[in-house]
Image: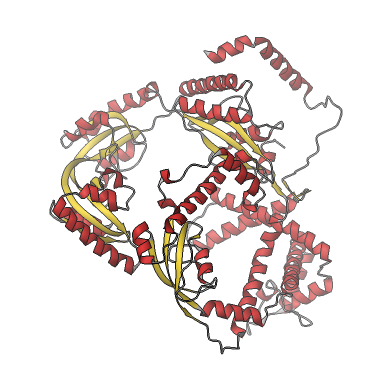
Amino acid sequence: MALIGKIREKSWLLIAVIGIAMLAFIIGDFNLGGDGPQEDVYGIGTVDGEKVNEDRYNQFLNNARNNIMQNKQQQNPTQQVRFTEEDDKNATSQAWQTSIIDGLMRKEYEEIGLIVDEYELENILYGQNGYKPSAISTQFKDSVTGEFAPDQLRQALDQLRESPEPGSAQQYKDLMDYVAQVRMEEKYNALITSGVHTTSLEGKHEFTAKKTVKNVTYVYQNYTTVPNDAVAEPTDEELKKYFNDHKNDKKYAQKASRKISYFVIPVNPSKEDSTKSFELLNKMKPKFASSKNDSLFVMRYSDLKRYANDSTSMAKPEGVPTQGPTYPASVAAQMENANKGDVIGPYIGQNGAKISKVLGFGEEKTASVRHILLNASSTEEFDAAQIQADSIIKVIRSKNNFEAMVTEFSEDPGSVNNGGKYEKFPQGQMVPEFNDFSFFKPIGTIGTVKTTYGIHIVEVLDREATKRPILADVIKSIEATKTTADQVNSEASNYIYDLDDQFSGKSNKEKAEAFEKYAVEQGYTVRFATIQDEEPTVAGFNEIAEGRILRLAYENEAKAGTLSSSPIRDKNRIIVALVSDIIEKGVPRLETVEDVMRAELRKEKQANYLIDQMLGEKDLQALSTKTGAKLESEGLTFSASNVAVGREPQIIGTAFSGLVDGETSVPVKGTNGVFVLRVDQTTAADEETTDFSAEIEQIKAQNISTIENQFRSALIQSSDVIDNRKLRRYGIR
């Protein structure tokens, strides 16, 4: 084998490596360089270069876990709840966010000299000297009046502070710290919102924006309607110019990250692995055939405890769209010609090796139709689509040209390429209106159906009732043996050996291209994972595999072009991975944004194509007919966020750009399409109104709410946060 050959070729290197490894084992933790132990620079993470307080993080983590359990118990008081893996993920996420904002806020308080002294803390606790009592304080209430009882609070705090019980003193300190922290946050909020002010001019503008209505008509054509061959692909020269012009745009700014390319080799059970299960099922087969209680037999002997003797257990051949049980082509003839009581198998099917007892048969009704979809969403569009559909039906009946009309008019991408056909779909799969027409109208009927998608012109082609077996399955799972896994691992090792040879003398980009080409040649799909340096994690892998991938990406100053030195095992699959790129923070390299920028360039060309199609035409109805574009009419206010065709702020901006009633714009490039707009009528806001107090208060309240809700996020975004928990856990840094 190639890998063995390589080991033989490099036997001297192998001996040297083993020798070094043994020396390292003997020396242990001795530092040959004499520089002392490596400094822990990151801890569990850093914020602006300072370590996150690990003790406070653990405290927040315990609090988050306890809160989650308490909430689950309150929601399910009669059940025994358990703390799940998902709960722990949520708790660790909450604890991390709390740790970050806690450290940032403490720094903020220190910088502006914000404190809560003992005098203020006392007043907050007991609601003295004009202070409102804290939320914790007000939990102590007089049993008769229901009012806050400061004496009860004082007694409880004294008992906690003076208690000899272990941990009581710490509980008291934590409670005081919490009350002080809440008060500090209240004072900080008051400081940052005290400067919020709204002028009467702002109030007037808001009033005008909400009350002025522009009734407009516009023709809108989406970029996706431009034929692929209508615009040329961006050239390399155009791309480079666009890159130089836009590389400093904020939207292209890069976060520091590592890109991992990998392909997956499944560890599937071999034929030999299934032998034991087949032998066991063959022994069970006569007993299953003679069993008088099929449900009990399945529940006792099947690894998958599932039994039903109704249509939910009606099986279909693999490849037929279904959410229920299936059987492979290897036993299809036996299944479809079996008698009630026959036991088929053993065979490999869903979930493992199985034998199946035929409990009976059911009928699966299917229909075949062809259709033309005319999209519609508003009442006006439905009315127009119905008129158009009636005209198309007349043409079809006179010329018998259904497929030609599909090509010309249908807006259903799922069927337009096969003459509009949907064949042999089961009852209940389509939306109710479409389903009822397909299954209850006579074969040959042509008519229209209205659904949420629009108006369909439907022709019923055929209907069938197919006999399907109702099965009870005894399933034995098949696990790949170590021998099988080792064979796949050896195959993956050979891939690594071949790739390593191919990488010789190549640039990082060429290595990534060679990796993808090689994987495809072997029949695998290359997948990608982007690991953010500020929060290194890889989703979708077990713990050991994630650790291996993170080591590949970060250990020993990993570089782009580094290939996994050995296969990575992840449950029932083996992975070959490559560090295909290391992206630095800030201005991007061309290759990292090439695809996105090509798409932007293509969109610009599409926009120019549509603008050329629309130039010079002032009659919007004629323009809509000529280009097949949507014709919309609606009333707009400047404060609106969406229009009939979606989020297109340029349409609102154009309507309020100074066009007078009856004036038509030139073609305008929008976010997702090009439009030409006419202002039909303007209904101005009441100019006699001088009281804008409601608008002023609304704007002020919105601004205060925005500041209170977003200042924490703003602090985090303006800080350099590195989450090192995963890398530390795996001993990487």
Residue at point 70%, 79% (across, down): 149
How many numbered circles does the render carry? 0
Compare residues 597 and 468 and report the one nearer the observer: 597
Residue 473: x percent and y percent? 29, 37
In the rendering, at what x and y percent does residue 587 appear? 68, 45
Q: Quadrant of residue 615?
A: bottom left
Please state which of residues 268 and 562 is positioned toward the viewer in this rendering. Answer: 562
Q: Nearer the viewer, residue 507 or 84?
A: 507
- Residue found at the very far front of the displayed protein: 616
Q: Residue at x 67, y 31 (%)?
A: 559
> Is residue 296 found left or right of 220 in the rendered image?
left
Q: Could one spot residue 165 in this view of the protein?
A: no
On-image quarter of the C terminus: top right
Q: Reply above or below: 306 against 489.
A: below
**Quarter residue 181 falls in:** bottom right
Q: Who's the residue at 78% across and 77% down the image?
A: 123
- x, y (%) of residue 455? 27, 60
Question: Is 173 on the left or on the right of 379, as rendered?
Answer: right
Q: Is residue 587 left or right of residue 173?
A: left
